[in-house]
Image (cartoon, rainbow, N blue to C red):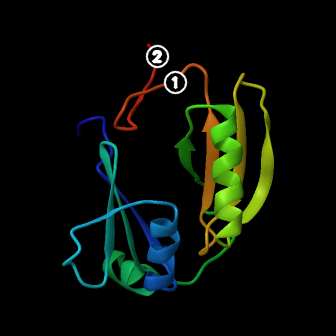
Amino acid sequence: MEQRLSLITLGVRDLARSTAFFESLGWKRSVKDAPGVSFFQCGSIAFSLFPRDELAKDAGVPATGSGFEGFSIAYNARSKAEVDDVLSEVQLLGAEIVKSAADVFWGGYSGYFRDLDGHLWEVAWNPGFEIDSSGAVTLPD
């Protein structure tokens, strides 16, 4: 298996509402003719929204469950100011700020929010991670 991620899919309760949330952030949908799913190109990774019940059915697992799922999704910002701007913007769109942005032990600056379906997102500025013009992160060796 190659060391890469291709697609992250979030199971959502209301596809139209969740799609509108990300579009309100300025994200542009791709593959617009795919019914019942929303796709977004995010740098070198594809991101999709799919009805939670249908995603669970596809995987053959129960759709119920809540609480901490054991992972978060991260948006790496280009500056501390961008971290603050993104957290303010998502809060205005209905997301819950879980942890306000602050300087962190690893030398960066980050905060957390839960999206409309409770998925945990970190918004972080890391001075050691280069972000290219497409938004792709390059990790140091």
Residue 101 x/y as whole percent: 77, 43
Relative to 107, is 119 on the left or the right?
left
Relative to 121, is 133 on the left or the right?
left
Q: CA distance from mark 2 to mark 1?
A: 7 Å
Residue type at mark 2? Answer: Pro
Compare marks 2 and 1 and give the one earlier in the sequence. 1
Residue type at mark 1? Answer: Phe
Residue at (61%, 67%) from the top-left corner?
A: 115
Q: Check the image and report above or below for 65 versus 130.
A: below
Marks 2, 1: nearer the viewer: 1
Q: Secondary structure at mark 1?
A: loop
Task: Please name the residue that numbered disc 1 is placed on.
Answer: 129
Q: Quadrant of residue 98?
A: bottom right
Q: Secondary structure at mark 2?
A: loop
Q: Which mark is residue 89?
A: none
Q: Check the image and report above or below for 70 versus 109.
A: below
Callout 1 crowding tier (Cα within 10 Å): few <14, some 14–19, many ≥20: some
> Is residue 83 shown to the viewer in this render?
yes
Residue 128 x/y as whole percent: 56, 19
> Is residue 68 shown to the viewer in this render?
no
Residue at (70%, 67%) from the top-left corner?
A: 92
Task: Please name the residue that numbered disc 2 is placed on.
Answer: 140
Asked whether the beta carbons under mark 2 and mark 1 sit within 8 Å of each other, the answer is: yes
Residue at (43%, 79%) from the top-left corner?
A: 61
Q: Quadrant of the C terminus?
A: top left
Relative to 65, is 100 on the left or the right?
right
Residue at (51%, 82%) from the top-left corner?
A: 17
Q: Quadrant of residue 28?
A: bottom left
Residue 22 x/y as whole percent: 48, 66
Callout 2 crowding tier (Cα within 10 Å): few <14, some 14–19, many ≥20: few
